[in-house]
Amino acid sequence: MNAPIKLKNFAQITWAIAGKDISDALKNKTILANLITIMLVVIFYRFLPVLEGEDVLPGLMVYDQGHSSRTAQLEDSLAFRTYLATSAEQVQAFVGRADRARMGIVLPPDLDQTLAAGQSPTVDGYVPHWASRRQVEKLRAFYEVELGTWAGQPVHIRTEGNVVYPRLEWGGLGFLTSLTFVLALTLTGILTVTHLMLEEKQTQTLQALLVSPASIGQVVAGKALAGAFYCLVVAGSVFVINGAIVAHWGLAILAAACGTALSVALGLLLGSIFEVKQQLMLWSFLLLNLLLAPVFLEIESDLLPQGISAALRWLPTVALARTLRLSFGNHVPWGTFAANLSPVLASAVLLYLAVGWRIRKMVDKT
Amino acid sequence: MKAIEVQNLTRTYGRTRAVDDITFAVEPGELFGFLGPNGAGKTTTIRMLTGQLRPTSGQAQVAGCDVVAQRQALKPQIGVVFEQQNLYERFSALDNLCFYARLYGVQKGRVEKVLAQVGLLERAGHRVEEYSNGMRQRLLIARALLHEPRVLFLDEPTRGLDAHVAREIRAFIAGLARQGATVFLTTHYIEEADRLCNRVAFIDHGRIVALDTPARLKATHGAADALEDVFVKLTGRALEGVGMYSSGAAQVPSGQGPWSTA
């Protein structure tokens, strides 16, 4: 058989196996339950801020460049809670770390003079980049009324060009989205992809497959394709629900592709090691904790020793979360992106090598 | 060319010799019985002959393909009915066979033909999980026949089936043999082999202790009525499971079986 025919044959069999597994998802209660649970996790994390409930008063961070004597009076407002900042960066961080749309303002240095001259001042209002136009208008209208009462003059808030993009080290919606993304992909890999392999082993349908023209390589490749399909569906759902935060879709899709490769490799390796579902149930809890706890810890890096914080970034799940968070920013240094993506890719390659080694062992055993 | 040719085939697991230096050949069109108690080495032999397990030493060719060196070329030449009913339970019989048809590159028309052959065409759209044991066994046979293999391996095809279903399966196997199929049948039901097979081999502790036609084995060992007596004489013990069905249930109808094998 020549190479193109061999390749076509390989692809046909691989696709037949993948197609079987993908269509089986609609009938397989375990896979359906896994996928529905993962979707619920995605929805839960998106609406977690809403579930936490509205603050009693909305928060406004104010940086007063001219140290106006009136600023202290803002703290007396009964309509909103005022936080005083010492720099414009602090205002941006206040807005960027939010998990719900909120505003920060920078008062002009000549505020007192403008008001004394009976003129209407214009202040810079900062909003998160993912806030909808409606949310921005609502915030602006609310604070223009409140600040107008405070100033005794109409106040204009300028938001054009004052959007804040989340930074890598900030929490808020950017972190929640990246956490959801990593959590959903890891769960899909460990639970769903592993299940694809395990079920063939437990029902001994793998034996029947291996006496058919399918080779073990084609079986694994078929499972990998089906697993990739599930992972991309899950990653897609994260983007559908949290799409507003993504600033660079190319980078987000690249992160999803690399995350999928990592997750599928993990699932295939576990599926090739485990023989029964009980092993998966026993180990999946531990594995999920080991892989996901560092993602939570890394965002609190201020509390960790510097060495540990730096080491955490080499873990594939942490690196994947950071890679996705980079796609939320307006300026992405390629070096930083590559540095964050490389642990993900390196781990995926190592896992695929381990899968290859396991398969070779399985073939040698026969 | 022999359908199956085995020379000094051995498989060890640690110090245990599961199959110990066996040599035999099966002619094309022959229904060959491989008999032995549980753990005698029947399934290990079938796994080696179907390319699922590498022999520790020795050689075997099936349909002209070396079971180790030409494993991939061997696959389209053989059909295997496993001891376990390893089907996709959530799929219908039709979907199960269509999936394997894609792997073998077989047309859908053949799927329907083979389903009709085993009498499952009317219920082809039902999920396998709704099938009885007998229907599943028939579907396993249909799967093994799907690509028209040159050699059919049946590993304990009637094990655990009730008497009348087992009789149906035997009749079907007999029908296949009449059509000239080469069948390698492992069983520990000695009467089944006696009535179905052209020749039988007794395996015990991994070694072939006798190999001939049932009639000649009985004549040689002075056991006029029962092949079981030959096994007892050769090994000093009875085959486990003998008597699990009545001899009446083991009878193979001389005419056409319950399913069309045409």
Image (spheres, rainbow, N blue to C red):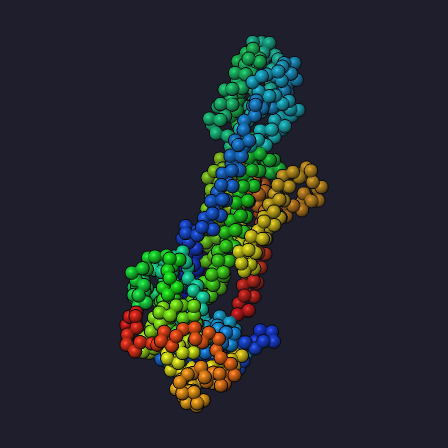
Residue B121, how many percent across, how many down?
30, 62
In the foreground, B205 or A112? B205
Location of residue A85 (image quadrant): top right
Residue A4, how many percent across, how many down?
42, 64
In the image, taking residue B89 as reference, residue A275 lies left or right, namely right
In the foreground, B88 or A255? B88
| Residue in the image at 55% along x and 13% along y | A149
Residue A14, how many percent across, how many down?
44, 60
In the foreground, A353 or B240? B240
In the image, taking residue B168 as reference, residue A330 lies left or right, namely right
Q: Is residue B222 above or below residue B132?
A: below
Q: How many marks?
A: 0
| Residue in the image at 59% along x and 42% along y | A322
Residue A165, how many percent across, how many down?
56, 33
Visible residue check, residue A7? no
| Residue in the image at 34% along x and 65% along y | B106
| Residue in the image at 36% along x and 68% along y | B165
